[in-house]
Structures are given as structure tokens and as C-alpha cells.
Image (cartoon, rainbow, N blue to C red):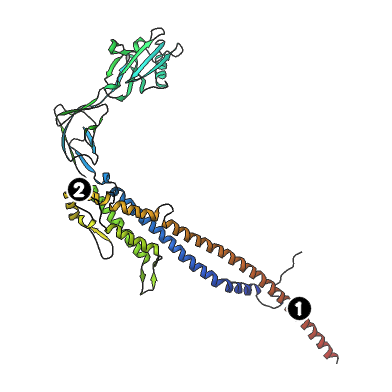
């Protein structure tokens, strides 16, 4: 049976409170030191998180600048957007074209004669369907020989080259309709039949051999346009080979003899926006770095990364990268200053819209090379930043080190608590023993006092 502890009964002391105060006095200083150290480490960890975010934003701003093809984009306008849309690669020459859409590309569509219903028996045999150069044989037996079952057999045939079958029911009855999935004159549909009872003959179409039981509802034809009077054709309604770098997406045919204007120009607006986004992201990184590493002598306080070598090295290499000249460009510009981007005393940059516009107007491609050539600023800066934020990069190493230190503090807290628990048990036992002893002494003192009193009375 466990003993009953009556703390303080013998001595009159509040032993529990006394032990608690002693344990708190013992654990207070090391706990405070651990709290202070952990707070500093957490602040640094948070600072590196903010730094990683700022670097990621700057890297995102470099995406449209480090790719020369994206940087040298082209803007395309179409006079009548109901007729066609257009897009241009960086290889497209600037200029205007008169485009007349003579016709759109169509897919083939065939229609059968009217049958009483979709469940009407048609016949048996083998239907050979051809779309362009692809052919498939569909066997129709006497258990699957209705119009609806023939439709299902065509649609479910393995290797179907792209012919869909459906049934359209009009006032005269049910019609089987075959539609090709591919446009262009090379993708006509032919249907022939062999074997069976001959009942499939109404579903055949082979005009080259004078077989036209099916009616041609829509002919498979190429798209055709006139570009500045020259004829261009395409099996689809997307024409990509008529003008270098220019894609025309046809929507509708023009009125005969009526053309619309397609204009290709340098996409300066997107380029300006890309440069402005880069300047903003760069300034955000620089000011963020400065804030994290700043020390205020008046208040004697500093940022969480004051004196940090990683922060100092990053700021230095970023500044040197963007301020250095670009070698090997074929244009007239070799640095940011020449295209209107200057640096302030605090390290931030600004873009002169007028000077940038003049540079773009004077030599658009050369501006692109400043950023996106092999040794361009955007490419070099992206590579530098990648060393910091890439997997296994410098920031990974720093954050892992900080997290390890924070984890170690957690271990130290556990060890400290174990030591304090042991101390509390020891003090509790010692004070309880003292309390018991004091109680015994008081009891003995009372007994002796009583005995002496009795003896004195008898005397």
C-alpha cells in the first residue's frame, strides 16, 4: 500500500509551493535562453522563406525575357475577325496581307435513302468503308442487320478510321448518315459491299465506279484562300505554310472578291510589360534583401539576417549580373542602360518608358538579345538565382541547417524537462522527509513538555 503524503502538516510549510518555486528558479534561465535562441532561429527561417518567395517572383518575371522567341513576339490584327483569326511566330516578317477566304475545308458527309424505321432490316454482307487512305471491313450478319444495328456496327468497329454513323429520322423515314472526322479533299468517304444477300447495296457510295446509292450531302474539300491574289490551300481550316511564321485560322468564307487585312507587327506592348514586370520583381528582391540585412544604430536593432553571408553574397551577385554588359550580341545594345534601364543609389532600377520605346523602335531584336541571347542578362540571372532556390541549393542548405538547430532545441527542452522533473521529485521527497522529522520532533517536544509540567506539579 502506498504511503499517504501530508506535506506541511509537521512543519506548517507549503511544501508544494516551495518545491514549485525552486524548480521554476532552476529551469527559468535555461528555458529563457532556449526561447530566445529559438525565436532568433524561427525569425531567420521565416526570413529565408520570404527571400525564397522574392527570388521565385523574379525568376517568374524572367520567363518571357530569357526566351528570344517569346521576347521577339509578333502582334497580329485582323480587319474582319468573323472571317478568320491569326497568330504569328517571331519568324514572321512585319507587314500587311490582303486575305480572301474563298471556302472552308469540309469533311465528307453521306446520306442514305429513307427506310421505314431504324429497326428496318436492310441486309447482310460486308461493308468496306474507306476514309482517305484508311479502310475497314464491317461484317453484317443476319442477327445484326437492321439500320440501327448497322449504325452500331460501324461506330463500334475496331480500327474505324474516323467515320461516324448516325440515324436521322425525317417525315419520310429513317436515314443513315455517315460523317468523316477529317477535312480536306484527300479524306473522301467510299462505301462498297460484298457477299451476303445483297441488301446492303443501298448503303454504298463509290463514284469512281459509278456507284452512288448514298447521296453526298457535303463534299470533302480543302480550304482555299487568296493572299495578296495568290491561291493557298490546306486540308484543314488552319493554314500554316502560306506565309512564313503566320497561321491563319479560318472561320467563314468571304463575300466573293472581298478581302480583309491581316497585319503583323512587333509586339511592343507585351515586351514593355515584360520589362516592367522584371523591374518591379528585381526591386522587390533588392529592397527585401536590404530590409532583412539592415541594422539601425539608433535603435540598435537589425533585421533577422543582419550580417548573414548568404544574404550579402546574393545581393552582390544579383547586382553584378544585371549591371554587366552582354557579350556576343549582333545588335547595337549590350547593356540595360542603353535601353533605358538605370540604377538608383539604393540599388533599385527604373525603366525610362521613352528611352525603352525608342530602343524597341530602333532595334527591337537587339533589345531582345540583351536579355535572351546566350549570355543575356535574363538567362544569366536565372542561372544565378537557380543556384540559391534550386533543389539542394544554397537556401535549401541554410533552411535545413536552421530547422536542424530548431529541432535540437526541442531535444534540449525535453532533456531540461526531464532534469526538472527529477529535481522536483527529489525536492518533494526531501521536504516531505523534513516535514515528517519536524512533526516527530514537535511531537517529542510536546511529550517532554507535558512530562516536565507533570513533574513540576508533583514537586
- Dot 1 falls on a residue whose secondary structure is helix
Closest to the observer, 45 or 203: 45
Compared across the picture, whether 141 is left or right of 2 comes to: left
- Dot 2 falls on a residue whose secondary structure is helix
CA gap between label 2 and label 1 equals 102 Å
Which quadrant would residue 454 be assigned to in this image?
bottom right
Which quadrant would residue 387 be assigned to in this image?
bottom left
| Residue 295 x, y percent position in the rendering | 36, 70
**Which residue in the rendered view is the most extreme toward the right?**
458
* Residue carrying label 2: 364
Residue 7 seen anywhere in this rendered image of the structure = no
Which quadrant would residue 348 be assigned to in this image?
bottom left
| Residue 453 x, y percent position in the rendering | 81, 88
Compared across the picture, whether 258 is left or right of 46 comes to: left
Which label is found at residue 440? 1
Compared across the picture, whether 352 is left or right of 399 comes to: left
Closest to the observer, 21 or 341: 341
| Residue 150 x, y percent position in the rendering | 40, 16
Nearer to us: label 2 or label 1:
2
The residue depicted at 84 percent of the width and 89 percent of the height is 455
Q: Is residue 390 above or below residue 426?
A: above
**Which residue in the rendered view is the most extreme toward the top?**
197
Q: Quadrant of the C terminus?
A: bottom right
| Residue 301 x, y percent position in the rendering | 39, 71
Residue 370 seen anywhere in this rendered image of the structure = yes
Q: Earlier in the sequence, mark 2 or mark 1?
A: 2
Amino acid at each position: 500500500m502506498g504511503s499517504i503524503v501530508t506535506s506541511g502538516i509537521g512543519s506548517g510549510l507549503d511544501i508544494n509551493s516551495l518545491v514549485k518555486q525552486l524548480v521554476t528558479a532552476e529551469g527559468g534561465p535555461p528555458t529563457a535562453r532556449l526561447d530566445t535562441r529559438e525565436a532568433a532561429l524561427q525569425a531567420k527561417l521565416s526570413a529565408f522563406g520570404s527571400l525564397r518567395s522574392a527570388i521565385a517572383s523574379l525568376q517568374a518575371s524572367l520567363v518571357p525575357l530569357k526566351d528570344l522567341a517569346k521576347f521577339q513576339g509578333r502582334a497580329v490584327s485582323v480587319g474582319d475577325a468573323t472571317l478568320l483569326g491569326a497568330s504569328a511566330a517571331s519568324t514572321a516578317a512585319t507587314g500587311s496581307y490582303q486575305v480572301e477566304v474563298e471556302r472552308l475545308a469540309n469533311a465528307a458527309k453521306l446520306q442514305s435513302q429513307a427506310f421505314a424505321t431504324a429497326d428496318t432490316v436492310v441486309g447482310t454482307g460486308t461493308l468496306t468503308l474507306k476514309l482517305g487512305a484508311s479502310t475497314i471491313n464491317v461484317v453484317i450478319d443476319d442477327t445484326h442487320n437492321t439500320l440501327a444495328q448497322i449504325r452500331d456496327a460501324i461506330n463500334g468497329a475496331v480500327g474505324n478510321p474516323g467515320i461516324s454513323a448516325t440515324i436521322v429520322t425525317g417525315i419520310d423515314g429513317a436515314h443513315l448518315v455517315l460523317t468523316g472526322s477529317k477535312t480536306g479533299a484527300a479524306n473522301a468517304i467510299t462505301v462498297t459491299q460484298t457477299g451476303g444477300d445483297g441488301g446492303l447495296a443501298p448503303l454504298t457510295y463509290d463514284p469512281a465506279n459509278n456507284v452512288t446509292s448514298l447521296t453526298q450531302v457535303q463534299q470533302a474539300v480543302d480550304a482555299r484562300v487568296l493572299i495578296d491574289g495568290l491561291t493557298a490551300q490546306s486540308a484543314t481550316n488552319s493554314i500554316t505554310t502560306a506565309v512564313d511564321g503566320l497561321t491563319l485560322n479560318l472561320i467563314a468564307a468571304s463575300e466573293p472578291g472581298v478581302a480583309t487585312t491581316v497585319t503583323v507587327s512587333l509586339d511592343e506592348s507585351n515586351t514593355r510589360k515584360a520589362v516592367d514586370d522584371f523591374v518591379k520583381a528585381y526591386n522587390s528582391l533588392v529592397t527585401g534583401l536590404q530590409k532583412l540585412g539592415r541594422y539601425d544604430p539608433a535603435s540598435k536593432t537589425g533585421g533577422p539576417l543582419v550580417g548573414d553571408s548568404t544574404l550579402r553574397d546574393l545581393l552582390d551577385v544579383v547586382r553584378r549580373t544585371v549591371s554587366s554588359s552582354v557579350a556576343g550580341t549582333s545588335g547595337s545594345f549590350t547593356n540595360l542602360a542603353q535601353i533605358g534601364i538605370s540604377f538608383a543609389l539604393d540599388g533599385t532600377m527604373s525603366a525610362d518608358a521613352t528611352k525603352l520605346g525608342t530602343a524597341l523602335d530602333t532595334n527591337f531584336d537587339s533589345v531582345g538579345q540583351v536579355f535572351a541571347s546566350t549570355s543575356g542578362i535574363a538567362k544569366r540571372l536565372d542561372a544565378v538565382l537557380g543556384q540559391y532556390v534550386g533543389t539542394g541549393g544554397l537556401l535549401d542548405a541554410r533552411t535545413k541547417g536552421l530547422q536542424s538547430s530548431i529541432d535540437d532545441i526541442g531535444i534540449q527542452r525535453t532533456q531540461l524537462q526531464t532534469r526538472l522533473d527529477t529535481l522536483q521529485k527529489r525536492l518533494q521527497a526531501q521536504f516531505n522527509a523534513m516535514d515528517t522529522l519536524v512533526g516527530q520532533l514537535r511531537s517529542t517536544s510536546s511529550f517532554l513538555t507535558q512530562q516536565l509540567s507533570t513533574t513540576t506539579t508533583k514537586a
